[in-house]
Image (spheres, rainbow, N blue to C red):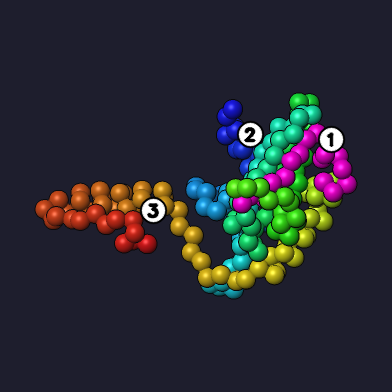
């Protein structure tokens, strides 16, 4: 079964909800330790705080489906959004903080595992996790407790295209010179 369309739908929905509450969201072009998105908050000129967000999308019916997160992913700056949609196209968005995820069962693959279905999301413990204004404020408070990082975000595809453009342009300006195209790592 192909989950990619549902995962993209979930990620787009999550981004739209975070933007609604004025969070600065960065979509990643790679998945490292479960990171699909970052919420970024600049605190000083060269310091920032960020949260790693994993996005999960699940279609719900009466049968159980599960969400699994490797234990190693769940660090102090990690949050999980679970987007659900049922056959009638009813959507929900649930938010889980690290301490909540750590309460899940751990399977033999060293993953936190949560089983969900259409009935389970009606329970009070899930209803309290529906993303809303109060949980958006809680994310903001959670960011205050996250360690500050000195970071640089680089868009590798853009940088590669810039290197190619610069090499082509300078080769046309000085066709008699033998230019060496730098590799991405050296430029960074």
- Report the mark closest to the observer, 1 or 3: 1
| Residue found at the very far left of the displayed protein | 176
In this view, the residue in front, 70 or 185, is 70
Label 2 belongs to which residue?
A: 6
Q: Residue 2, relative to residue 94: is it above or below?
A: above
Residue range (magenta): 110-126
Label 1 belongs to which residue?
A: 119
In this view, the residue in front, 157 or 3, is 3
Helix, strand or loop for disc 1: loop
Q: Are marks 2 and 1 in contact (CB under 8 Å)?
A: no
Please identify the quarter of the rendering in which residue 88 is found: top right
- Report the mark closest to the observer, 3 or 2: 2
Helix, strand or loop for disc 2: helix
Taking the image as shown, residue 118 lies to the left or right of residue 173, namely: right
Gap between marks 3 and 2 measured at Cα? 30 Å
In this view, the residue in front, 54 or 112, is 112
Q: Are marks 3 and 2 in contact (CB under 8 Å)?
A: no
First reached walking from the N terminus: tag 3 or tag 2 = 2
First reached walking from the N terminus: tag 1 or tag 3 = 1
Gap between marks 1 and 3 measured at Cα? 48 Å
In this view, the residue in front, 173 or 180, is 180
Give the number of the disc on residue 159: 3
């Amino acid at each position: 079964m192909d989950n990619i369309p549902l995962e993209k739908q979930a990620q787009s929905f999550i981004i739209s909800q975070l933007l609604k509450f004025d969070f600065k969201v960065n979509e990643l072009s790679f998945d490292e330790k479960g990171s699909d998105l970052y919420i970024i908050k600049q605190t000083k000129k060269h310091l920032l705080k960020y949260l790693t967000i994993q996005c999960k999308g699940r279609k719900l019916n009466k049968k159980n489906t599960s969400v699994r997160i490797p234990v190693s992913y769940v660090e102090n700056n990690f949050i999980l959004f679970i987007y659900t949609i049922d056959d009638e196209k009813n959507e929900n968005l649930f938010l889980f903080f690290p301490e909540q995820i750590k309460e899940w069962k751990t399977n033999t693959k060293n993953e936190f595992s949560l089983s969900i279905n259409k009935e389970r999301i009606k329970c009070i413990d899930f209803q309290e996790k529906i993303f809303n204004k109060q949980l958006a404020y809680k994310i903001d408070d959670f960011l205050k407790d996250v360690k500050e990082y000195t970071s640089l975000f680089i868009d590798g595809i853009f940088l590669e295209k810039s290197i190619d453009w610069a090499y082509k342009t300078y080769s046309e300006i000085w066709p008699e010179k033998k230019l060496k195209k730098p590799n991405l790592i050296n430029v960074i």
